[in-house]
Image (cartoon, helix red, strand yellow):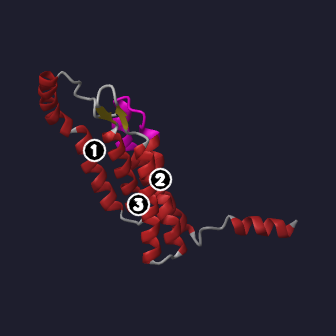
Amino acid sequence: MQEIKEIVISEFSDFNDVGELIIVVIRLLLAAILGGLLGLEREQRGKPAGIRTHMLVCMGAALFIFIPEQAGISDSEMSRVIQGVIAGIGFLCAGTIITRKDEQATSGLTTAAGIWLTAAIGVAVGLGREQTAVLCTLLAWMVLYVVPFFSRPISKKKASHSGHDEDSSDV
């Protein structure tokens, strides 16, 4: 019984010290918060990929980067890990883009771009580049919340001339 206990304890001993545990908690919580901030706008607009999706994407990307980094992989191996994260996120993003043949319109591009950027922010967090991740989140937040105030009048003007809904390209 003692041997089983030791095996179980050794299996759950990822952290060498409390400092490592704190770093993991900070990075994963930060990824969740930053992803959630970006997903909030999508959620408020009633889009399918909202807060939870963005939080999971950001935390997942951070974890995919952080674990190999903890394991001490080389820079070239890390490059392959990042490429894999990018490719995987591409599949998720593709699922949010819908082309309607009857209307000849595409929707979901903003959501896909948001998910893609959220994954990039997660990669930055996973690499310990928290300041860069926070700055990028603030800039993305401005794009999602502030830019529409300037672009809506232009979109409405274009829509009135063409007869199309101004949000048709935004899921």
Region of the chain picked out in magenta, as a range: 36-52
Q: Is residue 26 visible?
A: no
Kindly identify the residue that appears in the image at 32 percent across and 46 percent down.
113
Quadrant assignment for the N terminus? bottom right
**Residue 100 image position (x, y, % from top left):** 35, 30
The CA span between labels 2 and 1 is: 18 Å
| Residue 123, label in figure | 3
Mark 1 neighbour class, 10 Å CA radius: few under 14, some 14 to 19, many 20 or more: some
The residue that mark 2 highlights is 59
Q: Is residue 166 visible?
A: yes
**In-front residue for pair 27/113:** 113
Is 123 placed left or right of 167 in the picture? right
**Residue 162 image position (x, y, % from top left):** 15, 24
Is 161 placed left or right of 14 in the picture? left
The CA span between labels 1 and 3 is: 18 Å
Kindly identify the residue that appears in the image at 35 percent across and 40 percent down.
111
The amino acid type of the residue labelled 3 equals Val
The amino acid type of the residue labelled 2 equals Met
**Residue 97 image position (x, y, % from top left):** 37, 39
Disc with the residue nearer the chain's start (2 vs 3): 2
Q: Is residue 7 above or below residue 151?
A: below
Is 99 placed left or right of 27 in the picture? left
The residue that mark 1 highlights is 141
Kindly identify the residue that appears in the image at 26 percent across and 29 percent down.
167
* SS for callout 3: helix
**Predominant SS along the magenta part:** helix
Query: Looking at the image, do the residues carrying marks 2 and 1 touch, with CB atoms under 8 Å apart?
Result: no
